[in-house]
Amino acid sequence: MGTAGLLGVSAHAAWSPLLAQRGLLSPDGVFSAVGTALADAVFYTEHFPISPLILHPFEDQLPVPRALAPVALSDVRGWSLPPGPGLGEQSSLRNERHQKWPSQVGYPDPIVYQIELLVRPHSWTTSKVLPIDDEGRPTESFDREGRVFAPGTERTLPPSTIYGFNGTFPGPMINAEYGRPVLVRFVNRLDENPYALDRQDFGAPDWSFLTHLHNGHTAPESDGNPHYAMTSGPRSMGYLPGTWVDNLYLNWPAGGDEREKQSFFWFHDHRMDHTGSNVYKGMVGLYPIYDPTNAMDMGDERRGLRLPGVRTDRADGAFDVAYHIPLALHDLSLDDGVTLHHDIHDTQGDFPGTGNPAEHPEWWGTTFFKHFPNHGFVGDVFGVNGVAYPALEVKRRKYRFRFLDASVARIYELALMSSTQGPRSAASLGYVDDELQGQYRIPDGQRCMRFTQIASDGGLLPFPLVRDSFELWPAKRREVVVDFTRYLDGSPTTKGDVVYLTNVMKMPDGRMWESSSRSSPDAAYKVPILKFVIGDTAPDDSQVPPVLRPLPPLPPRWKDLMPNRLIFEVKRGALGGETEWLINGEPFEPDSVARSLKNPAGRRPLAEQRMGSFNLWEIRNGGGGWVHPFHLHMEEHRTVMRNGRDVTTTPQRGHPDDVSREDLASLDPNGSVVVYRGFRDFVGPYVAHCHNLAHEDHSMMFGWSITP
């Protein structure tokens, strides 16, 4: 205790100027700085490479995924251990069963898919690159044999190693429908390395995985959460190589309520302690879900709500929808060969073959990752659907885009901009250090189109929202319609016109943004991510109706629940290390259920809810100048209060999505939300956690459960 106290005093003195600059001279801020100083001194080096400059952005085409085909029924029947509802038929471990088979809700047997976890090479760009330093100047580079290339030498990036669903990043897309259950057999083959790839020093060291359908309404054995995995199922942090698990997705809305239907899930790894590294390594997949009831939202713009989309049913049992395009945003860093790899996990011997702390010239140009940067990992190259700075030709008509933030920690604010001069590299404009993030700017960029938002995490909104820009936090989804026939001023587009999807939120580290439209905007920070090129005119039978999907009603006296609400505070711990990030002052314990802080009724209830019940939960940001995207598994919630104010009718500035259902609460600095949510249909253990994955992996997660 004495040593810790002395360290705290000396750190406070040394860091006071920095704390003053960041406005962190509160007790929480001082605590955070002490933890940072200790971690920097003892555990790792907080330094990141400057990625080689991609010389020809916006030439690679955006990959538009095609729906994965299901496994033929005859092939499924031929498996030695086919899926089924019986005891031992849920995984290769033969120790669990599915809690609720589709027949129990009046649904047919599931459509079966098989997805393998594979080690594969992946290229982020076909462009030549120029190695640069943190001043934006050309610098030397290396190859895998350690040979040195002189400054100014243009290079081709080597492929990076990914752990991918079916070996791709992002992984496959499953087009699902309500009323048609899906069962996915995930098979772990990460022990196989047919291309003899260097695995580098990130990813789960035991090559295990745990797949979570975010935020599917699923039973615990198919939820892919550590609270279940460590006590049941695999009884370890994940499913090891050579094993498989059948995750059953009923595609049945919570409580059978049509108003609870959603529209865009994604699936990702959730292996305890290495979720961030496994997701960054490539374990990301897409799962749009359509609603065929009364043809409401089935991908056919001639029926139902008539949202953009032209559906084609395929002979293999899958279907594709034209003009529905998922856009999975992610950021990455590429190794410069000279930045020291010095990570907190090196102290645990997770990757003994790498010899860290060390430089790695043999990894030049491949993806670089730190498990535990104190702010949360952010990269300086921006990608969409696995490609850095891609381009997409669009028809002159309306499109439906499904946005996903698949980054570890970065938040984006997205706008649609035109530019006469086009992109210029940040280095050529004289920017240095953190200002090089994103690599390119459009100095003359002007907002030229708007988004019409039609859906959030929890599915279709009650009514469309017309927006100049929108924020996208880690794991959040936003669905928008963009009309490529006209500009903001009403003038028509013409073939060959270019529009840039542009990030206007500057976020140099994972603590929070430095500038955005709602906080200290930087008019010069306009980073193009994706180039849209206007093509030919195409038929368009779509519309955006004034009413979409009604919200499930709140109880008239919901405020009567406030005294007995459950309260959880997310906050940084004092001394760093593997339990840097805490909830209610405690690190995640996978075999236990968390307890609430004392509520106004004077109670500290366990995070246990009866099946079929509803309740209010409050999530508080404990301060220190951080933001936290906080995710609650299993059911969506409705935000009823933000920062102590009722937002059920009028949301606060910066959070217009509070009028919808969501599965992730955006916590601004020192902010709080109260959410109303249900606990229906299944029993067992679940988790809630920060979706800044560096925070989640270092204990900002708690277990909760539904009881009979």
Image (spheres, rainbow, N blue to C red):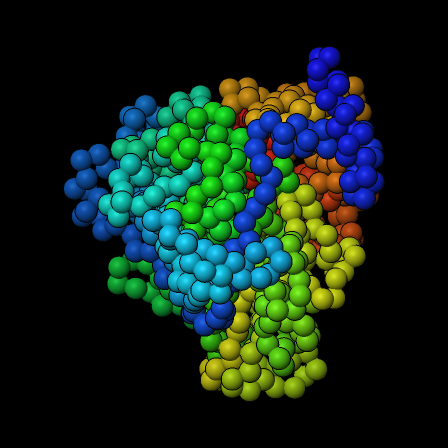
| Residue 708 visible in rendering | no
Residue 242 x %, y %: 27, 33
| Residue that appears at 67% across and 84% down | 490
Residue 359 x %, y %: 47, 41
Q: Is residue 261 left or right of residue 648?
A: left
Residue 517 x %, y %: 74, 60
Q: Is residue 643 left or right of residue 689?
A: right
Residue 693 x %, y %: 55, 39
| Residue that appears at 67% across and 32% down | 36
Q: Nearer the viewer, residue 460 or 230?
A: 230
- Specify the quadrant that holds the N terminus: top right
| Residue that appears at 72% across and 22% down | 7
| Residue 527 visible in rendering | yes
Q: Nearer the viewer, residue 21 or 633?
A: 21
The quarter holding residue 239 reads top left
Q: Nearer the viewer, residue 565 or 699?
A: 699
User: 406 above or below 79?
Assistant: below
How many numbered dots are placed on residues in this image? 0
User: 579 above or below 166?
Assistant: above
Q: Nearer the viewer, residue 236 or 91?
A: 236
| Residue that appears at 61% across and 65% down | 427
User: 490 above or below 101?
Assistant: below
Q: Is residue 540 left or right of residue 222?
A: right
The quarter holding residue 416 reads bottom right
Q: Residue furthest top?
A: 2
